[in-house]
Image: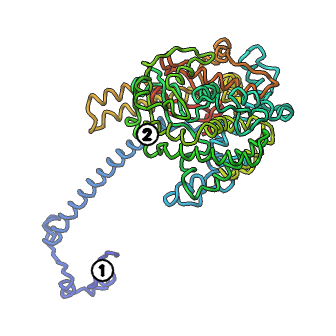
Amino acid sequence: MDVGHENKGYDKKDVEQGDLDLNTARANQVKLSFKKDGPIKRRTKCEKALIFFLVIFILVVIALVVVVLVQKNKIDDDKSVKNDVTATKEPEICQTADCAQASARLIASMDLSVDPCEDFYEFSCGLWRKKTVIPEASSFYGTLSEAYDDIQVTNKYLLEDMTSYQGIPAITKAKDMYTSCVNVDRIEEKGSSVAIPLLEELGGWPILGTGPGGNWSENEFSLSKLLISLHQYNNFPVIGMFVGYDDRESNKNIIHLDQPSLGLPGRLYYLQENLSEMREAYVTFASSVAQLFGADQTASERDVQDILALETDIANISTSMEDRRDTTALYNKMSISELRENFTEPTSNDVIQFNWFEYLSGVFDLENVKIAINESEPVVIYDVAYYRKLFSVLQKHGKRTLANYIVWTIMQNRVGNLDSRFQDLKTEFSKVLSGTTTQEARWKTCVSYTETYFGMALGHMFVNETFDETARAEALEMIGNIRGTFNDELENIAWMDDATRTVAKEKADAVKEWIGYPSDILIPEKLNKLYENASIDGDEYFKNVLNNLKGVAAHSLRQLRKKFNKNEWTDPPSQVNAFYSAVRNTISKYRFLYSKFSI
C-alpha cells in the first residue's frame, strides 16, 4: 500500500494568485501567525507530538541497523569458522584405479529407477540380477562367485607355470596335483580300475558279486574294522567320529561322536513325500555307478533299494536341525567305559557285533597316528538319541545291506575322481538334485581341488603375484577404528554392569586380525614343513586323491594329544571370505590381497 499525504485546500498556485482566505486555511488546519515565536513554540501540539514520535522512530531504526550489522558480522565470522573446519575435515576422494573400478561395479549393479524406500534390494542389486545368468554348472551365483571366478583364473595361471618356484617342494606338489587332475586322457585310460584296490582293501563291495572289487564275505564282516578303514580315508558313515576342540575347555582337543552325514543333502530328503523324485534319482545314480563297476542291473537295483531303506531309518533316528540349536543340551561328556554302559553294545546273539573301545582304539592306531587310548579316555556325545537307537536299526537290516551302504558312502564321494562315464552319471543326478545342467570346466574343478589340499602352497604364489600391502594396512586400520568405536559405545550402554563391560572390552581388545595371509607361508622352509608328509605323483590322480584323504584324516586325529591351536590359520589366502571365529577370537578377511574393493 502506498502511503502519502494530499493537501486538498490549496497549492502553490493558489498562494501566488492571492486566492487564499481564512476559511480555506481553517479547513486545512493551518494556523496563521505573525508572532516571532521559537521553532518549537510555533508548532501545534499535534506537530510537536509527531516530531517526538519521529525522533523516537529514527532512534529505533538506528538501533536496529546497528543490531543487524553486528549480527551480520557474527554470522560471517561463524561461516568463516565453519568453512575452515569443513575444509580441514573434508574426506579425501579416492581416485585410484581400484576406487574407479569399485564405483563402476556398484553403479552398474544398481537400478536407480527404483525407489530405495520401496525396495532397497532391487535399488542396490536390480541391474546385476537382470544382466547376470547363473552358470549351467552352478546351482547359485552371487558377487562372491564372480570374485572367486577371477581368482581361479589367476590360480590356473600360477599352477600351469612350470618355470617358477621350482626350488620349493610344497609348490611342486601343488602343481603336480593340478597336473594329474587335468590329465583327462590318463584318467580315461585307467577308467574304474583305479578304484578296485580300494574296494578290495575294504573287504569288497557286496553289490559287485564275484566281479573285480566284489567277493565280499559275510563271515569275515566286521563293522568296527570297516569303519576304521573308511576313517583312514576321512569318511565317517554310521558313526560321525572326529577330533576337535572341547566346547567347555576350548584350549583342549577331545573325541566327538555325532550323527553322520547322509547320501542325500539332509534327513528330510528321505522322509518327505514331495521329494520322492530325488530319492528315485539317488537310487538310479547309485545302481548305475555299481553297474559301471560290473554289477548286475537287477541285483544292483535291488541292493540299492535296500541301501535306501537303511538310510531312511538312519534319517528317522537322526535329530532335526531345529532340535540341535541348543548346544548346551547337545553336549554330553563321558568316558569310553561310560559310553559302553550308556549305549548298550550288541550282544553275542546279535547278527552285527560292535565294540566301542575296539573301534576307537583302532582308529587311533592307524598309520601316521599311533595314539594309545584306554577306556578312561573322555568323549563328547552330541546326539544321545541317535546312538541309543542306532544298533537296533543296524540289526534290522543285516550285514550285507550295511556293508553295501558303508562302501557306497565312499564310492559316492569318489565318483568325481573317476572317468567321464562316472562324471556323466553325477551330472544327471545333479540335474534332479540341484538343477545344474552341465559339468564345470575341468580346469576349474582341478584348481578348486588343489586349493583345498594345497591352499597355503598355492597361496605363497598368489600372495607374491597379487598382494596389495596398502590394502592390508587399510583393512587393519578399519578394524582398529571399529574396535575403538565399539569400546566407546560400551561406556554408553546403560543395561550393562561394570563387570560385564570390563570383560567385553577385554574380549574386544584381544581380537586377532587375520588379514590376507599368515606370514609363515612366505618362508619356504616353513611352507615345506606343512606338506612334508604329502605324497603326490603327477601321473596318478586317483592315487593322489586317496593319499590326500589319508593325510587329512591322520592330521586331524593327531591333534588329540595337542593343545588346540587358536593361532593356526585354516583357510588359504585366495579364499573369498570374511568371518569371525568365536573359539579363536579372530576376525578373518581374505581377498583384500587381490583387490581391496572386490567385495
Q: Nearer the viewer, residue 237 or 176?
A: 237
Q: How busy is the neighbourhood of tag 1: few (under 14 within 10 Å), some, or many (20 plus)? A: few
Image quarter (top left, top right, bottom left or bottom right) of the N terminus? bottom left
Residue where numbered disc 1 is placed: 6
Image quarter (top left, top right, bottom left or bottom right) of the C terminus? top right
Q: Residue at x 24, y 57 (%)?
A: 60
| Structural distance between the alpha carbons of marks 1 and 2 | 110 Å
Residue 285 visible in image = yes
Residue where numbered disc 2 is placed: 385
Tell me which corner region of the image, top left, top right, bottom left or bottom right, holds residue 366.
top right
User: Given the image, on which type of amino acid does mark 2 rest?
Assistant: Ala
Q: Residue at x 45, y 27 (%)?
A: 583
Q: Nearer the viewer, residue 60 or 255?
A: 255
Which residue occupies the extreme top position in the image? Answer: 525
Q: Nearer the viewer, residue 219 or 168?
A: 219
Task: Give SS at disc 1.
Answer: loop
Report x, y in % for residue 110: 61, 53
